[in-house]
Image: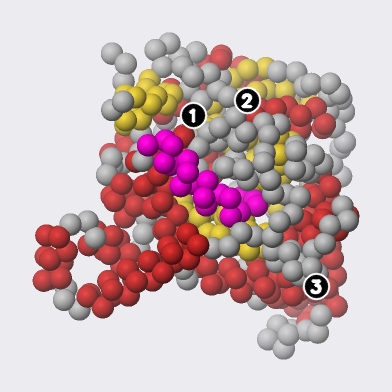
Amino acid sequence: MIRRERMSSVDTAWLRMDRATNRMTIIGVLVFDAPLDYDRLRAVVEARMLRYRRFRMFPVEAANGTWWQETRRFDLARHVRRVKLPAPAGLDGLKRLAGGLASRPFARRRPWWEFQLVERYGAGSALVVRLHHSYADGIALIGVMLSLTDASPGGSAGAREAPAEQAAQARESDGFLAQLAGPLSSAAADALRFSGGALERYLELLRHPTKVIEYAQLVGSVAAELAQLATMPDDSRTRFKGKTGSKKVVAWAEPLPLDAVKAIGRVLDCSVNDVLLAIVAGALSRYLVAKGDPVTGVELRAMVPVNLRPPTSEGELGNRFGLVTLLLPVGIVNPLARVYEVHRRMDALKRSHQPLIAFALLGVAGLLPRAAQQEMLDLLANKATAVMTNVPGPREPLFLAGARLAQVMFWVPQSGDIGMGVSILSYAGGVQFGLITDARRVPDPEHIVDGVRAEFERLLLAVLMEPWDARRPPALVERELAAAARKRRARPARRKPRTA
C-alpha cells in the first residue's frame, strides 16, 4: 500500500509558489579538497538521509488536499548521480551547472531532490545539491546536510544517530493555528489560541482576567503591522527589478574571515548580521555606480527569513520561519553610517511582529485556492527586490564520505518576480557569500560578489581610522584585529581549480 501524509499548509504555500520563471529550489554547492568516492557517498546518503521518510516521498496535489506520497519504486541511483561539467570546465562550468539546475523542474513522480557529483574538480571533487523548498527551509536543510558529515575522515556511513522523525511527525498538526502557535513566545501563543474560538476565549479570560489588556495590546499591534505590511510602498526602482525569465546565474566569492567581521561588530557595538547586511548593501551600491546608475536616496527592500523553530524541533523537516522586510540603505555612501543605519532598522524589526505575520500569511495562503494564493503572495513579493538569508554553520571543518569539505555555498529561491537571492553562510572560520540572479536583470553577478570583499576592506579601514570608543580600550581592539589578520595570513593559499 502506498503511504501518504498530509502536507502542512505552509509547505503547500511553498509548493504552489513554483513557476517556470522562479523555481522554489534550494541549490547548494560543496567543494572538497580531495576526491569524493561515489559509492561511499551513496552509502552515507542511504544510511543517514533516507532515515527521513520524507525523502522517499514526492508532493501530490489532489481534490482533497496536498499530500506527501511515497514513491512506489524508490531508486537512489536517480538521486545521487555522477555528472560532467559543461564546457569550459572548472569554476565557470560549476557555476553554469548550478545555475542551470536552479531553473530545471523536478520529475513529477519522484522525490524532488538530488545530488550531482563532479568527481574531478580542482584537486578534489564538487557536489551540487538541489531540493525543493516545500521539503524544508534553510535551517532544516543545513541540519540534514550536517547529519551526513563527520568531524574526521574515518566516520562510517551509519555512525550518526537517526533523526527524531517519529517525534517530529507526531508534533506536526494539520491545523494551521497549531502550527503557528508552536514556535512563538508564550504570550503570543496564548493570544493566537485565544483568537481560535469564543468558548476558549471566554474560559481563558475567566482564568486570567488581567490578560484583557495584554491581548488587546497584542492584537492591536499585530493589526497595525499587518496593515503596514499590506500598504507599504514599493522600494526604489533599479535595474534589479522587473519581469524575470527562466535563466538563472550564480556567483560566489572567497570567504571573508569571520573573526575580523566579529571584531568590527564589537567595535561598532553591532551584530555580525548588521555588519554583513551593510556590506551587501555597499556591494549593490558599488555595482549600480559602476553601471552608471544613480544611488542617491536608493533603498532596496530585502525579504529576510527569521527562524521560528523552537529548541525542541531538531530533526524536523518542513518550513518554520517568518519574514521581515528590511530596507537596505544602498544610497548611504559612508560605510560606518551604513552599518549604524542597518543596525537601527534591524533593531526595530526585532521588536516587531513581522515574522509571525509573514508565517501566518504563508499558512493562510496554503489554505486558499492556487490563484488566490498567487495573487496574495505576489502582492508582497512585488514590494521587494531581493531575498537575503544568513545561516550559521559549523565552526570546524567537516568531512563527507571521508573527504574534507573545503567550501560550501547555497542559494535560496525567489518568489514572484524577485530576481535576486543573497545567501550568507558561516563555515570553519569564514563567511561565504552566494548570489543568484535572474539573467535578464543581472547577467554578471560575479561583479557584485567581487564588491563584497572590496566593501569589507573599506569598512575595516574606516573602523581602524575611527576615533576609539572609550568603552573599548584601543589596545584590545588592535589585538583582536591583528589576531584576525595573522590567522588569515596563516591559512594555506587556496589552489586554483584545474579544468576537469
Pick the quarter of the image with the C terminus: top right
Q: What crowding class fits label 3: few (fewer than 14 Cα within 10 Å), some (14-19), or many (20 or more)?
A: few
Q: Is residue 116 above or below residue 358?
A: above
Q: What crowding class fits label 2: few (fewer than 14 Cα within 10 Å), some (14-19), or many (20 or more)?
A: some
- For the magenta stretch, what is the residue range? 369-389
Q: Which residue is mark 1?
A: 49
Residue 419 x, y percent position in the rendering: 67, 44
Answer whether residue 377 is magenta in the image: yes
Residue 467 x, y percent position in the rendering: 81, 84
Q: Which residue is mark 2?
A: 104
Sequence order check, earlier mark of 3 and 2: 2
Q: Is residue 110 above or below residue 478?
A: above
Residue 240 appears in the picture as rendered:
yes
Residue 164 appears in the picture as rendered:
no
Residue at 71% of width from left, 42% of height from top?
A: 437
How far apart in space, not on screen, are marks 3 and 1 (Cα)?
A: 46 Å
Sequence order check, earlier mark of 3 and 1: 1
- The quarter holding residue 212 reads bottom left
Answer whether residue 385 is magenta in the image: yes
Residue toward you, 128 or 402: 128
Q: Amino acid at mark 2?
A: Arg
Residue 13 x, y percent position in the rendering: 43, 40
Residue toward you, 63 or 104: 63
Pick the quarter of the image with the N terminus: top left
359 sits left or right of 378 in the view: left
In the image, which is nearer the foreground, mark 1 or mark 2?
2
Residue at 50% of width from left, 62% of height from top?
A: 231
The residue most toward the bottom is 470
How far apart in space, not on screen, are marks 3 and 2 (Cα)?
A: 41 Å
Q: Secondary structure at mark 3?
A: loop
Q: Which residue is mark 3?
A: 334
